[in-house]
Structure formats: C-alpha cells, structure tokens
Image: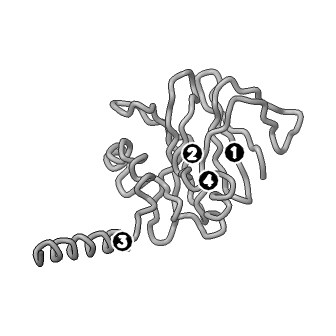
Amino acid sequence: MKKLKHILFLFLILIISNSCRPTNNNSKTEDLFEPYNNIIDVQFKGWHILKLGELNTDDIKLWKQNRGENMTPGMAKGKYESKEEMVALLIVSEINRQKKVKLILLKNNVADTPIKILREENVFNYPVIYSLPPAKYNDFYDTTKYIDTKNDCIAYEHIEASTIIYYYDKEKYIELVYSD
C-alpha cells in the first residue's frame, strides 16, 4: 500500500510539473519553417525566417488582430505563377543593429528548387508578408492604373506605412504600390 501511495504521489508531481511548464507558442511556427530552414542555412548563412516575436509590439498587436495568432508574418503560401503552390519567405538578419530583409520565393516542394529574390533592403522595423487572392488591384499613386491578376499575389507590408503587391505576369514578377 505504501508503495502504491508513493507511485501515485510521484505521478501527481509529474502531472503538476508538466502543467506548470511554459508552452512554446512558436512550436507551430517552427514546424511550418522546418522544410525551409536547411535551404536558408545553406544559401543564406546568418539569416532566418521572420517570426512574430521579432515585430515591434504595435505591429504584433495589429498582426494578431488582422491576420490571427496562427498566421506567421514571415511565410505566405499561394499559387503565384500557376496551379502549383509556392512559398514566399521573408528572411531576416541583424548585424550591428542594422535590420535586413529579403523576400524570397521557392516552390513548395523544396528539393532542388531555384530561389527567386524578389526584394532585399535594410529596414528600421520588419515588414510582414501574406498572400492575396487573384483580383483587381489599383496602384496607389495612379488610380487609373490597375492590375487584374490571374494568380495569387504576395503582399509585402510595412504595417501602418505601405504595402507593395508582387504579382506574376509574362514570366516575371512586377511590383504594384498598393498603399503608402
């Protein structure tokens, strides 16, 4: 009987200690990134996919309100060129407090996929990316200019500042300033 009580006591401690352990909110995000991490490690040493916690506090709040907690600001999947799903990644690096970003695109099946770099720049605050469906989009500066996309688009957004849409047309990606 004493042995049974001792085992139950140890089991109870184990349950309590596991329930008090902090959860890793990034585990789902890390799982999403897993197929792409090796490619980034090899081809872009010192870079990684942007995570929600790397945005400034206001941008995190706005991202969660507008995109939800389960969406990641560093990855967008869509059918950007054809019916085949592709993935856009926003990879980041910080050297001497200088934040750098690259918007890259690769096929969802990552084996031997060529990587397209759509944008790279130094930034003060990290932008976010997400997919937009095929639709008509107006140019911010020239409202008579619009595009009518046949495929999904990639939105590259500096939250509360500007959004650039990348869309595929005639074998290349073109930028459209959507908001500024």
Q: Using the image, determine if residue 89 lies above or below residue 25.
A: above
- Marks 2/1: CA–CA distance: 11 Å
Q: Which residue is mark 4?
A: 68
Q: Nearer the viewer, mark 3 or mark 4?
A: 3
As rendered, which of 58 and 178 lies closer to the eye? 58
N-terminal label among 2 and 1: 2
Quadrant into which the N terminus falls: bottom left
Q: Give the mark, 2 or 4, whose residue is nearer the N terminus.
A: 4
Which is more N-terminal, label 3 or label 1? Answer: 3
For residue 63, which quarter of the picture? bottom right
Q: Which residue bears the numbered disc 3? A: 21
Sort mark 4 into few (<14), some (14-19) or many (20+) by Cα contacts within 10 Å.
few
From the image, tell me which residue sits under label 2.
119
The residue sitting at 33% across, 50% down in the picture is 41
Q: Does residue 47 appear left or right of residue 64 in this picture?
A: left
Q: Amino acid at mark 2?
A: Arg
